Amino acid sequence: MNEMEEELEKELEKKKEKEKEKQEEKKKRKKMERSSPAGRSTFRDSRNEVSAIDFVADLRSVSTGR
């Protein structure tokens, strides 16, 4: 009986840890959304951070020669 209780406690601890990790991941995502312009996804350019829309617009202008 004691072994089963210990096993259940270990499983409960694992579940709590996973839940904690999920919460931390959600916080990180929210923070990233807030830090990016208008909640858009961003790409890291070698010089600076560029929004996805601007990045695609730049690619199109290069490919069409405009």
Image (spheres, helix red, strand yellow):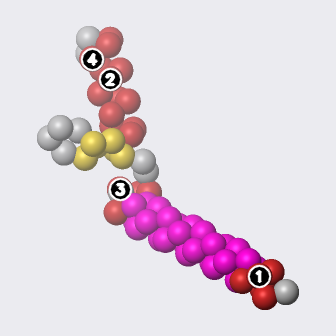
Q: Taken as a whole, is the magenta stretch helix, strand or loop?
A: helix
Is the N terminus in the top left, top right, bottom left or bottom right quadrant?
bottom right
Residue at numbered disc 4: 62
Residue at numbered disc 2: 59
**Left or right: 41 in relation to 63:** right
The numbered mark at residue 57 is none
Question: Residue 36's x, y, as percent?
Answer: 36, 57
The secondary element bearing badge 4 is classed as helix
User: Cβ–Cβ below 8 Å for labels 4 and 2?
Assistant: yes
**Left or right: 66 in relation to 27:** left
Residue at numbered disc 1: 3
Sort mark 1 into few (<14), some (14-19) or many (20+) by Cα contacts within 10 Å.
few
Q: Residue 38: which quarter of the image?
A: bottom left
The answer for how far apart the CA atoms under marks 4 and 2 are is 5 Å
Residue at numbered disc 3: 37
The answer for how far apart the CA atoms under marks 1 and 4 are is 67 Å
Chain part drawn in magenta: 7-34
Which label's residue is closer to the chain start, 3 or 4?
Answer: 3
Residue type beneath disc 3: Pro
Residue type beneath disc 1: Glu
The answer for how far apart the CA atoms under marks 2 and 1 are is 62 Å
Sort mark 4 into few (<14), some (14-19) or many (20+) by Cα contacts within 10 Å.
few
Question: Residue 8's x, y, as percent?
Answer: 76, 79
Q: Nearer the viewer, residue 6 or 60?
A: 6
Task: Say which residue appears at 67% left-offset and 73% top-offset.
Answer: 15
Sort mark 2 into few (<14), some (14-19) or many (20+) by Cα contacts within 10 Å.
few
Residue type beneath disc 2: Leu
